[in-house]
Image (cartoon, helix red, strand yellow):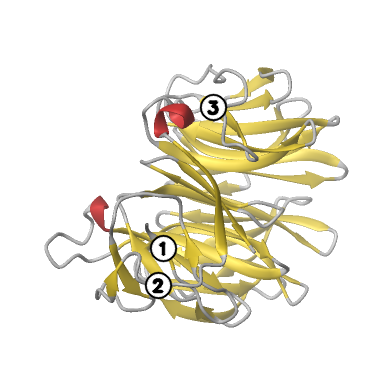
Amino acid sequence: MSHIEQSDGFPPAVVAPAREGTVFPAGSGGTPAGQAGESSGARWRTDWDSKIESVSGNCSVNAVASTVLDGREVAVVGNEDATVRMLDMATGLPVGEPLTGHEESVLGLATAVLDGRAVAVTGSGDGTARVWDLGAREQIGQMLELHRGPVNAVATTVLNGRPVVVTASDDGTARLWDLATSEQIGDHLVTAHSDVWAVATAMLGDRPIAITSEAEGPVQVIDLATSRPLGELTGHHGLVQDVATTVLDGRPIAVTGGADDTMRVWDLATCEQLYTRPTTEPLTIAAGLVNGRPVAVTSAQTALADGPRHDLAGQTLRVWDLTGREPAGQVVDGPWFSEAQTLTPRGRLLIASRAGLAALTHH
């Protein structure tokens, strides 16, 4: 068994069966602490684990999200083979046939509700974003296709009572779209001189906001009602790889991971940094609530004793207790872990990997 071990209120977590691996203490920078399987008292339950063939057609999963479809919690995954697939989170079994239409890999994925229907929005390397009716299992509306480069990330929210999506692209722009009409709203939210890597959304009071990260620029906080910046999150040295949002003590916060080997937590109302913690360079970040407590999950690449720093075999997954402001225990090596994970609204942890897609429940 492989494990994610946790402390500070979040006990050890057992991940779905994979290969044996080395366990590293949180904050150790990759110094082995023992072999996977040595810990006890697991408090996370693996609900199911499916083979990668049933998840993504024997290719990498790039993005994962969740929604509720016909009363069932469903995992939605975007894949390297340009397909979108769904799995029943109670069983791990596929739901319907893959959704097809993109011409290149699905890079970003988010879910929303449109006119009472569960929908997914996907961004692709083909430069388009598409909206899918998950119940009907078909694309709806026109492609969102004004970008001139790969769509790296998408995030959904509600503006003036209507569902909208923010897209981030290698063409140096972030754009806001009306999901009902598939039309762009206003001008570009961001016009950068480099790739826009990541985007997340949050509510600041009754105002929807977006947080964007550029390859060679600031992390911006943008008021979606006015398309104007509210401020910048400054402090990282170098590229910010990813950004996620949740709520801490009733306040909306952002969690960012940078190439400077830090994870930082920000108050979105003031754009001030609350605290920072050293961690091996985070590639992706998910954030949400587990049993009412804010948690972040980071995947990263670690230094290996016998390999280069950016060897994918050195990927790790770390779980953070944001209330305690400390890394919640220990991490686990890859290649079992991929670059896609999410915390569902019901507190489940979804981890996409080269071995399958695991759904974990804290209990």
Q: Image quadrant of residue 95? A: top right
**Front position in the image: 348 or 285:** 348
**Front position in the image: 49 or 118:** 49
> Sequence order check: which comes first, mark 1 or mark 2?
1
> Sequence order check: which comes first, mark 3 or mark 1?
1
Identify whether 322 is placed above or below 314.
below
Q: Image quadrant of residue 139? A: top right
Image position, residue 190 (x, y; %): 57, 49
**Residue at the spot of label 2:** 39
**Residue at the spot of label 1:** 3
Image position, residue 56 (x, y; %): 45, 29
Distance of label 3 from label 1 (alpha carbons): 29 Å
* Residue contact at pointers 1 and 2, CB within 8 angstroms: yes
| Residue 84 numbered tag | 3
Left or right of residue 230, residue 191 in this image: left
Distance of label 1 from label 2 (alpha carbons): 8 Å
Identify whether 218 is placed above or below 56.
below
Which quadrant: the C terminus? bottom right
Which three-letter amino acid code belongs to the residue tagged 3?
Val
Image position, residue 92 (x, y; %): 57, 36
Mark 3 falls on what kind of element?
Answer: strand
